[in-house]
Image: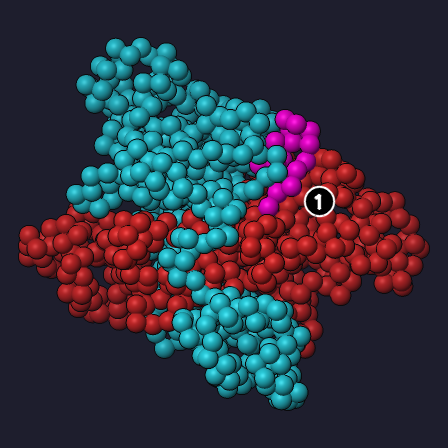
Chain colours: A red, B cyan
Amino acid sequence: MGTAGMTLSGIRVLDLGQIYNGSYCGLLLGFLGAEIIKLEPPTGENLRKRTEGQQIDSYAFNLLNLNKRGITLNLKDPKGKELFKELVKKVDVLIENFATGVMEQLGLGYEVLHKINPRLIYASGKGFGSTGPYSNFLAMDLTVQAMSGLMSVTGFPDGPPTKCGPALADFMGGVTLLAGILAALYQREQTQRGQYVESSMHEAILPTLTSQLEGYFRLKGEAAERTGNRHGGLSTCPYNVYEAKDGHVAIICANNSHWHSLCKTIGREELAKNEKYSNNLKRCANIDYIDEEINKWTRTKSRFEIHKILFDAHVPSAPVMKLAEVVNDPHHLERGMLQDIEHPEKGSVRVFGNPVRLSENAPLKLRSAPLLGQDNDAVFQELLGIKPEEIQGLKEQKVI
Amino acid sequence: MGTAGMTLSGIRVLDLGQIYNGSYCGLLLGFLGAEIIKLEPPTGENLRKRTEGQQIDSYAFNLLNLNKRGITLNLKDPKGKELFKELVKKVDVLIENFATGVMEQLGLGYEVLHKINPRLIYASGKGFGSTGPYSNFLAMDLTVQAMSGLMSVTGFPDGPPTKCGPALADFMGGVTLLAGILAALYQREQTQRGQYVESSMHEAILPTLTSQLEGYFRLKGEAAERTGNRHGGLSTCPYNVYEAKDGHVAIICANNSHWHSLCKTIGREELAKNEKYSNNLKRCANIDYIDEEINKWTRTKSRFEIHKILFDAHVPSAPVMKLAEVVNDPHHLERGMLQDIEHPEKGSVRVFGNPVRLSENAPLKLRSAPLLGQDNDAVFQELLGIKPEEIQGLKEQKVI
């Protein structure tokens, strides 16, 4: 069903993704124009009905499965395995993010499927990767955040290690897997062969610690692990989240020109002139004093007022937006990164658009995630030539 | 200099990246086998010497600029612009992450360069994108984290909004840009034409808030914004970071089987049998009690001891690793995600490997980031046929 004139027109993907990691990767391939067939067990993947007693599909499931066709297939059933292998012959890409070894135990690992379809790109989203001492560790966003060091560097020096609120490991892993698939598609144009692609959440997020690693290496392990809202290496000041009348505002002076402009704007030119604060290192040595002087000014104004004043003065700042503001962000709405669409069970729902922006990718019309098995009849008939009466039989045998 | 047998062999990239976002994108293209020419102003990009008085290049600069060739060029100089346009004819991809409008003001925006080289893929890493009401806002990781809602959902309910320690916006934006470039390379195989690719840090991180958006939509805005180390939607329990004898440990029960196994393991089978805690929603209603009962057990043991016991019991858990442990992580070392290489100024340094794993990408040998202008002679001669004596003249005129 891929869209003509889109970047990945003509590419078909079998998406076995579950929860966030694999499903997000499939979502973006679809946004780029590939035909995505989401394959779930006959009971549905875990994200559909996450909360006990939930009657309709979760919002999260809809967010991450827009524009996909939906089929069901029991991969533990011999007939299900047979149909799966037939489907694999008809697709360019397979995505899965099961625990390490699950696909191999089903007899459906890369080695097997590569023989059936040598052009197949087999993409595996793993928590810790398929090799190495942690490969069998149970990986969810929380456990990967813990083991990767993300928690140790988030939060305040006098508080506990703190989880990053966003599901960073899942999504960074998912988009890294996407890059791997796209690279493999390019390479297949040269070699005519598919390959095995892997991303590990644990590896994908390691580079995000660059500031902390810089501090660690530079100070030979003596750097503070957690610095709250201050700079990760404590080498820039001002750099913090300050108190406004109605919330908080982030301010940074990346250079002395920002600093001079800030001092002037808050009516404290004597600070800019004082040799004691004349560069970042000196300001860092007086960080508590400087942060408090800035707070004295920010406390008298609202977040958006401060942002407007500092924008005009060319000092980097930003209001700390609340979740309710983000959901209604005018910038996201204008750029189509948030859009309202109709869902058959929920009515109007707000969803993400495509963060991968390409001038030659035709505009995308978003449609809601498939209901469970919604496209069974169409896909099995179209791809494998299975007749409607046979499909009914497969349903009764719980194969699909 | 691209490596034969690698995924992007034969692809040449002009990398104008600075600080993290664009440079990380270029780093990964290089890891996939492209030839990366990092182009800096004659004074060097800002990350080289980040701290005042720093004599040698920063560790962060080295981490994000491995395996690149390094040239200098003054894009404000007329002769510099002329040479730049000649270079653009010789490359497949250009990466830049300047503030919106900078390249256009230099007369070197997409429209101009696309005419010079219609096959060029022009990749722009932006903070808030090139259109929309925020397009001119000053974007750094801190300000984007503030405006995107990440800070509002990180930290404890009784504490302030908290920055995610990792530079999430920069890196998520960088790898999203990478995906866009790879998609455009694939499309160019079909159309023979390049295109404009954009990623906005602000957009790239929005999907990472899926849990919070689910909670917001489901509870019609009544969800807690910040839940500390508990589940973002407060719909899973146990799910927290618990106290160990020597630090902290993350534990989740994603389903009732995990819960029953946990209760048994900590010697509290009566909890598993109690109807009051028989599903996630009921456990969430008693979250303080349950978390404290688990803490009573975890406090008696070390992080790694707890992880071992719970791994054997099939309950997802993970020690909260400290930065010093991450830097020496045996799993990263075994998989080559951390490697030691020689740096001409620093001696032995530890760096990242490639998180985008492809079975048909030839093994990569890592080498340190270029010194400032290290490859000026070779690149200008090789690509533009400029003779050594002319290069000397360009240096004297401060063009390079």
Number of residues whose C-alpha sits closer than 10 Å to that of mark 1, classed few (under 14), some (14–19) or many (20 or more): many
Residue at x 45%, y 54% (from the top left corner): B329
Q: Does the magenta portion include B346?
A: no
Q: Quadrant of the N terminus of chain A?
A: top right
Residue at x 23%, y 32% (from the top left corner): B43
Residue B332: image x %, image y %? 48, 50
Residue situated in front as seen by the camera: B30 or B191: B30
Q: Which residue is mark 1?
A: A110
Residue B311: image x %, image y %? 59, 67
Residue A270: image x %, image y %? 6, 57
> Would residue A363 be visible to someone looking at this image?
no
Amino acid, disc 1: Tyr
The residue range painted magenta reads A183-198
In the picture provided, is A42 more to the left or to the right than A386? left
Residue at x 80%, y 54% (from the top left corner): A376
Residue at x 61%, y 50% (from the top left corner): A130
In the picture provided, is A396 more to the left or to the right than B14? right
